[in-house]
């Protein structure tokens, strides 16, 4: 069986297999990143944060636990349905397309862990930056935490197999037409599955062009979740703060 829709992310992110494959992501590192980031931005006490492409809500839940009023949005209905179990008076989740402005303004908008650059239509990338601009209040900050494409391409593992919960995920990675692509094949309950992840290989220069077109100003750049200086050759992340 081959899963296929017009937009790969609309189907892959909505499957349980996506969450199985990436279940070992480091929660402590993610929480430390959120603590570092909010401290650096000096967000107001009980400030408002929009977690854009929030998935199942792990960052939103932690941000809420340290005192922020958080809204998490994602295109995946299954992920939002899961996240809603954590809702309270200052934590809410909704299905929302990040290309379109959310009808509220925030002290910060976070787009974390390479949740950008999926779109086939180049205009959707610019629309997302413009939407973030509209979602910020007068003193608000936008944050995009993206992969450092130069580092990723240089250190790409062409092929490997990762077995989790009895499922052997065979992964092939390559660069093509300005995208970093991962083909994922596996068998579950005698059924064959194939998914493809495809993310634009955006560089800092590419983001600067988008920011210029959207009318936002890049303020700071970091190269990892500890907020160390960005190095184009050696940094694993490209973390940009703008307004």
Image (cartoon, grey):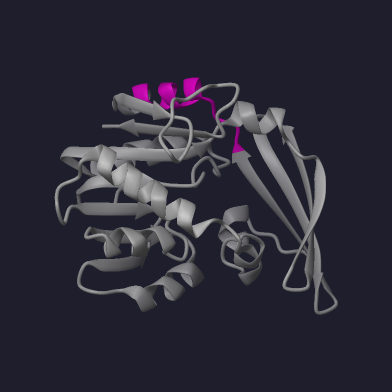
Q: Which of 65 and 167 is in front in this view?
A: 65
Q: Nearer the viewer, residue 209 or 147?
A: 147
Dominant SS type (magenta): helix
Residue 213 location in percent, x, y?
A: 36, 24
- In the picture, measured across the screen, residue 166 lies left or right of residue 222, that is right
- Rendered residue at 76%/37% (across/down): 174
What's drawn in magenta, residue-wise?
200-212
From where the camera sits, is residue 100 visible?
A: no
Q: Nearer the viewer, residue 229 or 206?
A: 229
Would you place residue 241 above or below residue 199 in this image? above
- Rendered residue at 40%/58% (across/down): 59
Q: Does the magenta stretch include residue 98?
A: no
Q: Is residue 204 magenta?
A: yes
- Rendered residue at 33%/49% (across/down): 35
Residue 12 location in percent, x, y?
A: 62, 61
- Rendered residue at 43%/63% (across/down): 58
Quadrant showing the C terminus: top left
From where the camera sits, is residue 51 visible?
A: yes
Residue 229 location in percent, x, y?
A: 44, 25
Quadrant showing the N terminus: bottom right
Would you place residue 227 above or below residue 26 in this image? above
Give the quadrant of residue 53: bottom left
- In the picture, measured across the screen, residue 100 lies left or right of residue 198, that is left
Would you place residue 139 above or below residue 216 in this image? below
Residue 214 location in percent, x, y?
A: 33, 29
């Amino acid at each position: 069986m081959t899963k296929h829709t017009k937009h790969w992310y609309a189907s892959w992110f909505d499957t349980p297999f996506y969450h199985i494959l990436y279940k070992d992501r480091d929660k402590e590192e993610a929480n430390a990143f959120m603590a570092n980031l909010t401290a650096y931005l000096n967000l107001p006490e009980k400030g408002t944060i929009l977690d854009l492409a929030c998935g199942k809500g792990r960052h939103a839940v932690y941000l809420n636990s340290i005192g922020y009023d958080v809204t998490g949005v994602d295109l995946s209905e299954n992920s939002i349905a899961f996240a809603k179990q954590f809702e309270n008076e200052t934590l809410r989740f909704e299905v929302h397309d990040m290309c379109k402005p959310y009808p509220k303004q925030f002290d910060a908008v976070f787009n974390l862990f390479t949740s950008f650059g999926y779109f086939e239509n180049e205009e959707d990338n610019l629309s997302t930056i413009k939407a973030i601009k509209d979602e910020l209040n007068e003193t608000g900050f936008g944050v995009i935490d993206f992969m450092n494409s130069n580092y990723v391409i240089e250190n790409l593992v062409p092929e490997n197999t990762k077995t989790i919960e009895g499922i052997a995920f065979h992964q092939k990675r390559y660069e093509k037409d300005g995208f970093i692509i991962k083909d994922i094949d596996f068998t579950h309950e005698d059924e064959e599955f194939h998914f493809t992840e495809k993310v634009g290989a955006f560089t800092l220069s590419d983001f600067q062009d988008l920011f210029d077109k959207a009318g936002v100003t890049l303020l700071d750049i970091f190269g990892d979740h500890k907020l160390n200086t960005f190095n184009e050759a050696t940094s694993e992340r490209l973390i940009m703060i703008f307004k």
